[in-house]
Image (cartoon, rainbow, N blue to C red):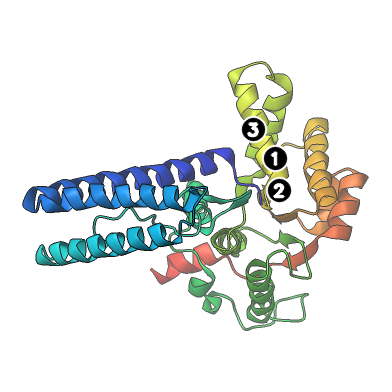
Amino acid sequence: MSYDPNVLRRAVERLENGRRARSDQLERRRADAYAREPRLARLDRELRGTMSQLMAAALRQGESPAQAVLAIRKQNLDLQRERAVLLGGLGLPEDALDDKPACPLCGDTGWRGAKMCACLQKLCTEEQIKELSKLLDLGGQSFDTFRLDYYSMTPWPGKGTSPRENMELVYEVCLNYAQKFGRFYFKNLFLSGPPGLGKTFLSACIARTVSENGFSVVYDTAGNVFAQFEARKFLRDSDDGREARDETRRYLNCDLLILDDLGSELTTQFTQSALYELVNTRLVAGRCTVISSNLSITEAAQRYAPQIASRLEGEYHVLHFFGDDIRLLKKRRM
């Protein structure tokens, strides 16, 4: 799992800010409690002292520390009982002044050894969805809000089935792909069809679900992606070139790349080379990709180099979109 460095940085900042906010809140609570009941401050100092004594007794050499340890533990319990009574008198629970991490699994560090803790992963997911929302309307786009009633039940000319029946199958594949990401039979999807039939909507649904399940997702249009590859090559020593290098690294290394509107770019020898690098690198690494295009897979095979066409035809499962333009249908219903 490889989150974008900016996403990870913002998530870590939120984790640290939360830790500082809780620490500040605890200090204010302690100061208020000590002011209202000064004996509490003395009890806390004594309790810290008994802990030091307990450790010293346990490490003592030359004599059995058992009796000393028992005496110190009894003293510690007596102090804790008195402290609990005083806190109760202030209307506070007995652990109100204790320093407790929000996440007991990692102690608010965000990591359990070399593995990212679920608390930091949750923050990464939230930051990633914010990033995706800059290009995708994730606010209202989810599998639950996808509407099949925009697709006609009348058989479509030359298809042998209706747009509704076809979209029911497309929807099920996309839903299972997202919910079983990494375990689904198909690793790569090619969403093919004219504009206005729901390709971007379903791409957004996939992005949301896969991201919420803790995987790194990058969405971008083909034009933007190829522009970054171009900047990486021709502006390599500039700030823009270094930023482009980071962006292309994201495209190549994320768990799921959603490449939208393939075929809208000006096809040149350079874009052919960039597309081959993108497709081949991700296939070799076993990473998943969803491509949407107004081109059919046959048209894509004719447009791009044979090495690209071979990989698209052999490694991508094609989902066909056909029917009436939903944007126009929505406009008529207004």
Classify mark 3: helix, strand or loop: helix
Which residue was labeled with disc 1?
A: 265
- The amino acid on which the numbered mark 1 sits, given as a three-letter code, is Glu
The mark nearer the N terminus, 2 or 3, is: 3
Asked if labels 3 and 2 touch by Cβ distance under 8 angstroms, the answer is no
Q: Amino acid at mark 3?
A: Asp
Q: Residues within 10 Å of mark 2 (few under 14, many from 20)?
A: some
Mark number displayed over residue 246? 3
**Secondary element type, mark 1:** loop
Where residue 286 sits, quadrant-wise, is bottom right
Q: Which mark is residue 251?
A: none
Please state the horizontal and vertical placement of residue 67, each as a whole percent of the image: 41, 61
Few, some or many residues within 10 Å of mark 1 (<14, 14–19, 20+)? some
Q: Amino acid at mark 2?
A: Leu
Residue at x 29% of width, y 64% of height:
77
> Which residue is label 2 attached to?
262
> Helix or strand or loop: what does disc 2 sit on?
strand
Q: Nearer the viewer, residue 80 or 240?
A: 80
Q: Position of residue 190 (x, y in %)?
A: 74, 59
Instruction: Residue at 61%, 60% (x, y): give it.
Output: 203
